[in-house]
């Protein structure tokens, strides 16, 4: 079993990684001494895992189940209200624990609901996608979408513990597995050259769901994210580096309608665009740009998404919540393994988009 | 001008108290260097104060106004969604500042919206009722009601600065002024005997809106609240003492329908009930119980609200979010000037309610 400790000033917490953990969730929840447990999950995930999770939780405290609709379109304030209604109905109190069982979207919704219910009850994240295991379950960001913008509404609410069971990933469609690998590649690119190279070598094993390779990648990705989040819990500085590929990626999601491309797929493409922009800024060479595009393709992710509008993309990026007063700061690569923040002239950004097939 | 510093580990902030401050809000907001300012207020307060406030804010940054409906019934997740829509429309970003201009309900709603917009933007509280000036604008609690329970949904989000203008209180109905005095009496009762006695002596001046008496009371109440909140930002321990009179008070509000009695009126009555329960627990004498009831009456608050159901009140208190697993902890008085937390046998609580005219 791999363990990563996220060292936050106020309250450190552990991430546990191994195959088969969801059947033994009680080990991780019992130390929290909850008055009651509220498993929040999606209807699709409930079919697969609600039974073993509920059985494990019942060993600790009375457990209620709340299943919400699947998918990005459920990521709204309305769904949060629905989760809160369910918590009220099941008589949750301040000593209760919410178990967020599902992918990144579910974790964001359930984490947000937990953070505003009675001004915050504890949440245990049990991510069931690779994307959530390597990324969204770590760091305490929660939230839902606004019609105008993704994740516009949310909080910072650190989980009490994260339990990542690698065997649940066998239920994932290949597309979602690849989407998770985009974030794994991102972590290497922004912070650890050696890890990036190792991931590229391990891609066949990762795509074949090798438990050992998965646990190593999840643990290393969590370490990188945990270190950065620990040094910058509320996103003043270094944490922004985790958005490598995301400014471009969010614009792709916005332009194509949220849900058409998976978040990780948009990020995969965004990594290539960020690499290209880095080269145009004179930071890295074209060989490295190609190395990134190759890795993204090997992970079975789209390195290019053609035919989008350059002007619409520019506008979406200016409206991104990381932009201040309409100025976009990009995360770019100084080299593979080291990201920095940089404002880029519009002309260079437009050239990057143009070279990638934007109109 | 009185100044009270709230000393929080993460981020201390100041409360400024004097007549005439809202016309000079720019002094307090300029240091925050906002990219834009978003005044959130209620339609009634907007009629009185939106113009001078907006003019002052415009001296610092582009300013937008968002007016929501008045009253407790507007304190819902729907209204928060409306405020967020207005922030989006006015192109608020992470560098923006929300100015919460209004009473306690408005401050709770606007503070909550600010806390979840882009995972938290800064808020300046400009309370326009005595209740908000002495209580709800200090301490960072935000939130809205759920049909099942008051303030069930919310966050902790500390303001960047609080500006309490005593001259705006001239617009308050007397009933609302008295409601604020309930919290002033509460602060003395729970933490400072001398301040309690001074308040009782000053009640005529306070009811006559004497600026000096008001500023002294607001400052001392804020000091007491700030000290307690500073030592216990997220309500693990000492902060619970601020709920003196509130367990009983919330039950009164729940049983009579939120809005029939003002929060401060319910608290005034709750202080008398808490005093009576303290005597039944053998902590204080009947002379002190009478002293409390006398002070509450002098503040033109109801010392008794008769005819409510004892069983319904017990049930409401067991469902309070401070209750854990159905057990109610009461804040009671060890003496005037010192509150403690204590569980009380149902029989004693029922005797207290019975003596106060509950059926």
Image: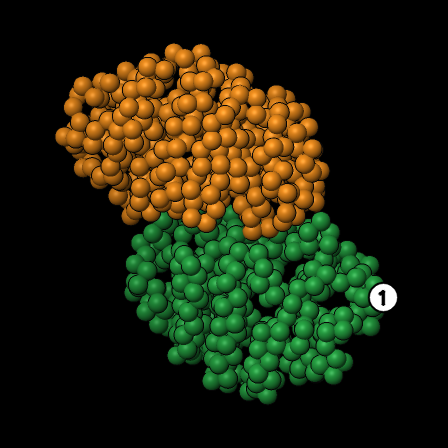
Chain colours: A green, B orange
Report x, y in % for residue B17.
Answer: 49, 27
Task: Examine the image and state in which quarter residue B340 appears.
Answer: top left
The residue at the far left in this view is B282
Report x, y in % for residue A283.
Answer: 72, 74
Report x, y in % for residue A169.
Answer: 51, 76
Residue marked by disc 1: A359
Quadrant showing the C terminus of chain B: top left
- Residue A231 visible (yes or no): yes
Q: Residues within 10 Å of mark 1 (few under 14, many from 20)?
A: some
Instruction: Using the image as rendered, state which of residue A53 and residue B72 is in the foreground.
Output: B72
Q: Is residue B121 above or below residue B63?
A: below
Task: Examine the image and state in which quarter residue B291 appears.
Answer: top left
Task: Examine the image and state in which quarter residue B150 appears.
Answer: top left
Instruction: Using the image as rendered, state which of residue B279 and residue B68 is in the foreground.
Output: B279
- Residue A129 visible (yes or no): no
Q: Residue at x 16, y 23 (%)?
A: B285
Instruction: Using the image as rendered, state which of residue A32 and residue A219 is in the foreground.
Output: A219
Decide if residue A139 is on the left or right side of residue A308: left
Q: Is residue B162 above or below residue A195?
A: above
Q: Residue at x 27, y 40 (%)?
A: B328
The residue at the far right in this view is A359
């Amino acid at each position: 079993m791999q363990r990563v400790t996220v060292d936050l000033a106020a309250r450190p917490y552990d991430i546990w990684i191994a195959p088969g953990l969801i059947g033994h969730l009680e080990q991780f929840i019992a130390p929290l001494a909850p008055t009651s447990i509220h498993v929040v999950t999606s209807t699709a995930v409930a079919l697969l895992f609600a039974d073993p999770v509920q059985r494990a939780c019942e060993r600790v405290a009375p457990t209620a189940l709340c299943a919400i609709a699947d998918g990005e379109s459920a990521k709204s304030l309305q769904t949060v209200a629905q989760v809160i209604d369910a918590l009220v109905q099941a008589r949750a109190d301040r000593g209760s624990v919410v178990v967020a069982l599902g992918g990144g979207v579910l974790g964001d919704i359930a984490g947000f609901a937990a953070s505003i219910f009675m001004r915050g009850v504890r949440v245990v994240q049990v991510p069931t996608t690779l994307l959530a295991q390597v990324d969204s379950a770590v760091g305490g960001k929660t939230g839902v979408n606004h019609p105008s913008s993704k994740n516009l509404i949310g909080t910072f609410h650190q989980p009490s513990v994260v339990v990542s069971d690698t065997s649940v990933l066998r239920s994932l469609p290949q597309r979602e597995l690849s989407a998770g690998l985009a974030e794994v590649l991102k972590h290497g690119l922004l912070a650890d050259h050696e890890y990036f190279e190792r991931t590229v070598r391990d891609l066949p094993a990762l795509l074949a769901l090798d438990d050992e390779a998965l646990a190593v990648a999840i643990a290393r990705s969590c370490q990188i994210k945990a270190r950065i989040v620990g040094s910058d819990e509320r996103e003043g500085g270094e944490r922004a580096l985790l958005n490598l590929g995301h400014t471009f990626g969010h614009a792709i999601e916005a332009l194509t309608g949220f849900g058409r491309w998976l978040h990780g797929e948009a990020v995969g493409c965004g990594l290539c665009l960020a690499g290209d922009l880095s080269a145009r800024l004179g930071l890295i060479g074209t060989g490295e740009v190609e190395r990134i595009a190759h890795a993204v393709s090997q992970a079975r992710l789209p390195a290019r998404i053609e035919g989008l509008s350059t002007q619409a993309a520019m506008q979406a990026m200016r409206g991104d919540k990381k932009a201040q007063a309409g100025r976009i700061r990009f995360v770019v690569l100084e080299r593979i393994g080291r990201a920095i923040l940089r404002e880029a002239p519009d002309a260079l950004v437009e050239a990057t988009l143009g070279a990638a097939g934007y109109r």
